[in-house]
């Protein structure tokens, strides 16, 4: 959090000097007058104004700025649309080179999401959950995982043995668990330690 304490002959001048140093505008800061200016008598005993100016933190703006900088270093020009849903703030990424930001099976997108959450929460008083999507990739991936869950559940029942999936981030493991929750013929669990934690599907009979 950027904060300046400025001493000047008036509150207004102190504020303007702080805004210039922070390169921002008045609506983006919090201003505290620590001491008001006093003129004194016949020029004697005068005191300057002391003002504390704190730059307000916008975790979502910080996140978007971070993403655009990272994307630029990867040679990707990025557009970001902000959406809200029950799970948190969704930053929907768009680009002609969006595949670079998604990566194999969403690995790059998941890594960016992890880093973006660190950025969003580094100076925020309240926890911010940021979800990255990329041209509806998350929904397409969800449908793929649901099909995979049903197929591997059938396989586990056919061979009557447990079946392990590849390591996945927690939100993808959750999709597998929820997809098979109503299937009383199989049970699911997560095994291993991050980032190698994976879902295991096994017949309920074993």
Image (cartoon, helix red, strand yellow):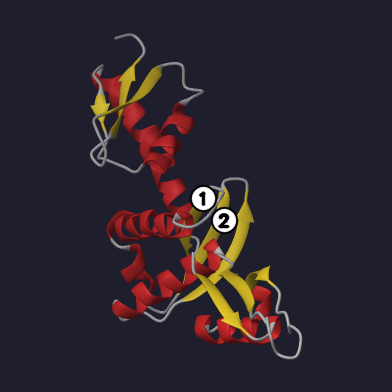
Q: Residue drawn 57% across and 79% down? A: 7
Q: Residue drawn 23% across and 39% down? A: 196
Q: Quadrant of residue 195?
A: top left
Q: Residue furthest right?
A: 41
Q: Residue 89 — which label?
A: 2
Task: Name above or below for residue 100 compared with residue 90.
Answer: below
Q: Residue drawn 68% across and 75% down? A: 27
Q: Out of 32 and 84, give the one closest to the viewer.
A: 32
Where residue 175 appears, x then y in whole percent?
45, 38
Q: Out of 133 and 113, give the one closest to the viewer.
A: 113
Q: CA distance from mark 1 to mark 2?
A: 6 Å
Mark 1 Cα-neighbour bin, 10 Å: few <14, some 14–19, many ≥20: some
SS for tag 1?
loop
Q: Residue furthest top?
A: 205
Q: Residue drawn 26% across and 38% down? A: 194
Task: Name above or below for residue 70 compared with residue 77.
Answer: above
Q: Residue 129 — which label?
A: 1
Q: Residue furthest bottom?
A: 42
Kindly indicate whether the residue at mark 2 contacts the one at mark 1 (C-beta within 8 angstroms): yes
Q: Residue 103 — which label?
A: none
Where residue 91 appears, x then y in whole percent?
52, 63
Mark 2 Cα-neighbour bin, 10 Å: few <14, some 14–19, many ≥20: some
Q: How many marks?
A: 2
Q: Earlier in the sequence, mark 1 or mark 2?
A: 2
Q: Quadrant of residue 189?
A: top left
Task: Name above or below for residue 13 compared with residue 138.
Answer: below
Where residue 111 appears, x then y in whole percent?
32, 56
Q: Which part of the image, by quadrant, shows the C terminus?
A: top left
Task: Name above or below for residue 6 compared with residue 125.
Answer: below
SS for tag 2?
strand
């Amino acid at each position: 959090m950027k904060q300046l304490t400025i001493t000047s002959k008036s509150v207004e001048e102190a504020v303007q000097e702080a805004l210039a140093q922070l390169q921002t505008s008045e609506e983006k800061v919090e201003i505290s007058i620590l001491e008001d200016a006093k003129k004194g008598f016949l020029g004697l005993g005068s005191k300057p104004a002391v003002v504390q100016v704190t730059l307000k933190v916008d975790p979502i703006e910080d996140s978007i700025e971070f993403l655009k900088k990272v994307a630029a270093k990867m040679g990707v020009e990025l557009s970001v649309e902000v959406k809200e849903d029950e799970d948190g703030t969704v930053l929907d990424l768009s680009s002609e080179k969006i595949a670079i930001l998604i990566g194999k099976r969403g690995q790059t997108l998941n890594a960016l999401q992890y880093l973006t959450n660190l950025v969003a929460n580094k100076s925020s008083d309240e926890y911010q959950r940021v979800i990255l999507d990329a041209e509806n990739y998350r929904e397409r991936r969800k449908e793929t995982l649901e099909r995979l869950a049903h197929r591997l559940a059938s396989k586990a029942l056919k061979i009557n043995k447990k079946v392990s999936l590849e390591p996945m981030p927690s939100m993808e493991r959750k999709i597998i668990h929820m997809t098979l929750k109503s299937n009383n013929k199989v049970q699911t669990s997560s095994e291993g330690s991050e980032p190698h934690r994976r879902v295991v599907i096994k017949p309920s009979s074993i």
